Amino acid sequence: MWDDETWHTLATRHVKLARDAGALSELHLAVRSRILLHAHAGELAKGAALIAEAQAVADVTGSQVGPYGAVGIAAWRGREAEATELIQATMDGATSRGEGRGLTSGYAAALLYNGLGQYDKALAAAELACEYDDIGVLGWSLTELIEAACRSGQPARASDALQRLSETTRASGTDWALGTEARSRALLSEGETAESCYREAIERLGRTRMRPAVARAHLLYGEWLRRENRRRDARAPLRTAYDMLSAMGAEALAERARRELLATGDSVSELTAQEAHIARLAVDGRTNVEIGAQLYLSVRTVEWHLSKVYTKLGVGSRRELRRALASLGQADPQA
């Protein structure tokens, strides 16, 4: 129903009641929902921290329900090999159990491929997800379909999806709903109409808990401005998108924003808050495994962030990294 505040309230209460009652079968469902909420709120580290709990409860109860929360986290993070393996395994398991909702994992695949800029794959995945009229994820799937279709040069398919999307967003009327519709409508618009829709999307989504949605609105607006040959104007929304997505750990979308920012002639030299944190832990002697455990990140994610830090600072080792951070006032070279 596009009601992020009620989702937050109910998901929080659901987990608390299930834990207090020791209702393990119910706790598994509650934790999965909470993980998905964290994903949509851009709290990927918090969501990832709950995945192990969800799996432990599933093992105890013998639950066969798909790990949809973990799939959502993987899709938002945007690591293709890891995410596609998990998505496919979830869909295969759901199919073997006759669990129709497993097809909605196509939404996660569409999100992943849109982040990676593989729009043909995103379109195919989104259309598969939209065949199953699941009230929980249909709106999200339609949103991904619209972006993928527009980027694939198929506006008619995007227009049909927008009409379906608006039936739910107009009925809801929340900022999350109407902001999402405005972002989608902007993709199909031109000139002042498009710009007005992008600005409405950013304003409305900025009043919600859904930080990735805000970041993606900035990203799409910046991409549109650059394609309108307004490169200087594009830098601010693209910078905002890059900083927000990097801080969340939404790696593929952050990389997409970085490439767009570079295309405007801007540079991406400053470290994000998360990159700086990881870099400081690295020069303090923490291994990648230890950093990942502390920040609830996979080793691959830590390696990805460190590679970006090395590139931005022009260094090739942790010893050089210490000196570079010291020059920025972010580390003690004698430590």
Image (cartoon, rainbow, N blue to C red):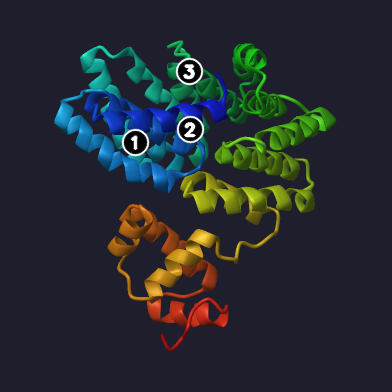
- Amino acid type, label 1: Ala
Q: Could one spot residue 68 in this view of the protein?
A: no
Residue 304 on image: x %, y % = 41, 57
Residue 60 on image: x %, y % = 15, 31
Q: Nearer the viewer, mark 2 or mark 3?
A: 2
Considering depth in this image, is 284 or 254 the residue closer to the camera? 284
Is 302 above or below relative to 190?
below
Is 275 above or below relative to 324?
above
- So how many labels did they put on this image? 3
Residue 17 on image: x %, y % = 34, 29
- Amino acid type, label 2: Leu
Label 3 sits on residue: 127
Q: Earlier in the sequence, mark 1 or mark 3?
A: 1
Q: Quadrant of the C terminus?
A: bottom left
Outermost front residue:
20
Residue 70 numbered tag: 1
- Amino acid type, label 3: Glu
Q: Earlier in the sequence, mark 1 or mark 2?
A: 1
Q: Residue shown at 41%/48% (left/top)? A: 45
